[in-house]
Amino acid sequence: MWRLARSAASNLPRTRRFSTSIPGPCIVHKRGADILHDPWFNKDTGFPLTERDRLGLRGLLPPRVISFEQQYARFMESYRSLEKNTQGQDDSFVSLAKWRILNRLHDRNEILYYRVLIDNIEDFAPIIYTPTVGLVCQNYSGLFRRPRGMYFSAKDKGEMMSMIYNWPGHQVDMIVLTDGSRILGLGDLGVQGIGIPIGKLDMYVAAAGINPQRILPVMLDVGTNNQKLLENRLYLGLRQPRLEGEEYLSIVDEFMEAIHARWPKAIVQFEDFQMKWAFETLQRYRKRFCMFNDDIQGTAGVALAGLLGTVRAQGRPLTDFVNQKIVVVGAGSAGLGVFNMAAQAVSRMAAAETHPQFFLLDKDGLITTERKVVDPAAAPFAKAPGEIEGLGLREGANLVEVVKKVKPHVLLGLSGVGGIFNEQVLKAMRESDSPKPAIFAMSNPTMNAECTAVDAFNHAGENIVFASGSPFKNIDLGNGKVGHVNQANNMYLFPGIGMGALLSGARLISDGMLQAASECLASYITDEEIQSGILYPPTRSIRDITAEVGAAVVQAAVAEELAEGRCDVGPRELRQMSKEETVEYVKHNMWYPVYSPLVHEK
Ligand SMILES: NC(=O)C1=CN([C@@H]2O[C@H](COP(=O)(O)OP(=O)(O)OC[C@H]3O[C@@H](n4cnc5c(N)ncnc54)[C@H](O)[C@@H]3O)[C@@H](O)[C@H]2O)C=CC1
Ligand SMILES: CC(=O)C(=O)O
Ligand SMILES: [Mg+2]
């Protein structure tokens, strides 16, 4: 059932901080300069004098002790002056400068880094995540200073089971894995795609409070088909074409076995794999490991929550979702993931004979059963000629034609093609059958968005509902009216899916757990918010949202008897928790960055 009322727990104030009680001591097996060079233990000038004595740090730091709050303020001051001093300069230059200053802090002092990230997530998500992370990946070989995460390459075949023990952390809870083959909408970036797992895991720490000592970004370097990278003398990955077929799968298999052998309870998120491997690996592993594909499943849940929001925005009951005409542009892992989940929602809501009114386009236009070769994953959404003849449409019809003739309630882009929702397409949306047409330009990063927010409101009209994958500012429509810009990004779900799977100790991640996550996000927004065009909560509430989503996932895992529990909280205890208690349980398990007293042990 789709729940709409906000739960009692979500009516609590949207606080930004959790678990600020005095931290317990932290054991460190190093002394002196080795501590200063370890970003996990380093407190810079924040080491109290007693600790400097205990840890052999006396004389290695300037004498004055600076408090955590002062260090925080000092960093924010330098960040704000960077912003001021670079005003008017080239956007990419400024974004990279901001990323550098944050990355330097990340490399030096993780506790301070995560505190500034969590407390300023609205400002910093666009730097450590989309859109800047895309620019970072594109320039990674030149930007590289220190390694982060692990790299497994085609040359490591047969060695992964032992290599995995090179990772210094004893426990790993969350792994984000990519092969770099489809980084955002930027294509094959080979080894440079490592920036994505790093950015996603930063979001895990910020949103879900996953302990950063227990995260692992991973790059599977199986080569690249990006000729420019292969010719770039600075390129840091394997200089060979991508492995294909069984050779490719044997590398992924070996990696999955290796991580499972060392950390059987770790959750693995597959990210930014090209479509053929995204679907294939999901089918191959989802029953054997606790894993999910964020681009297929996380995106689908976020999009579905937004689509249900658009039904509410039209003043229609949720069951009217079955009558919505939805055009999706992009028949890749993300677009097909959205239609699959939307079709499941329709079949839950409607009579058996109801056919969803979904229209799917790829680079060759409208996909129909007449097409010579249709990808099996797209086939269920190919239109039969009989379904579209009445509309005057045919195989391969272009986007403008489709929008003009279908008059869709929703136009959703997951094509990776910047600007494809051009003036003509957006103007055609004025004739939509919906009183509040919805335009979702979900491709990332910003330059790959199907349209900008300004163009959407200018050309499609002020009564649209708008969402984009990367952030845009709200639009001033004049006369005190605001065109609200939503960020339809899987960041609203993947942290809660991962956290819920982890805390429930689920054996696998089921469709029911993903559906629960999506329903929870959909129910987070009030009717009043929906009426002003708000479909998703603001990024600054992401910890609260993630706590709710995580709890929904835990409860779904319990209901499906997939939960095996974690540490001293077994399935029985989880089953006995009310919804509110489950939310509190998730919040209680969220890590929050504070300096712990360090105690040396040999
Ligand atoms: N907002 C979010 O949370 C998410 C956004 N995305 C974005 O979605 C985009 C696509 O991702 P995937 O589906 O994984 O990629 P993909 O490569 O699997 O699929 C891309 C699809 O777009 C189609 N396409 C290419 N040019 C086109 C054109 N001119 N007209 C119509 N269709 C065209 C292709 O035929 C293909 O079907 C990327 O930009 C990615 O950043 C992906 C996941 C989540
Ligand atoms: C957001 C995301 O996962 C993507 O653009 O691929
Ligand atoms: Mg992705």
Image (tube, helix red, strand yellow):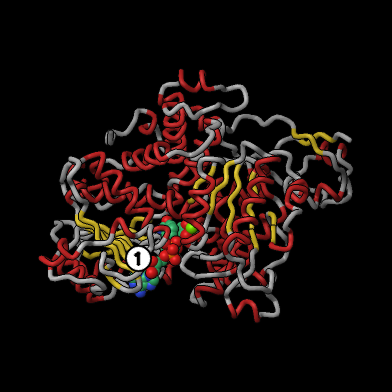
Q: Is residue 315 above or below residue 19?
A: below
Left or right: 376 with respect to 119? Answer: left
Q: Residue at x 26, y 47 (%)?
A: 308
Q: Position of residue 135 (x, y in %)?
A: 54, 69
Q: Residue at x 78, y 40 (%)?
A: 48
Quarter residue 402 falls in: bottom left
Q: Is residue 380 above or below residue 475?
A: above
Q: Position of residue 448 (x, y in %)?
A: 42, 70
Q: Residue at x 49, y 36 (%)?
A: 500
Left or right: 294 with respect to 248? Answer: left
Three-letter amino acid code of the residue under disc 1: Val
Give 160 or 182, whichever is nearer the viewer. Answer: 160
Q: Secondary structure at mark 1?
A: loop
Give 480 or 186, whichever is nearer the viewer. Answer: 186
Ligand 1 is found in which quarter of the picture? bottom left
- In this orientation, does residue 78 appear? no
Q: Residue at x 28, y 36 (%)?
A: 2
Give 318 or 31, whichever is nearer the viewer. Answer: 318
Left or right: 116 with respect to 315? Answer: right
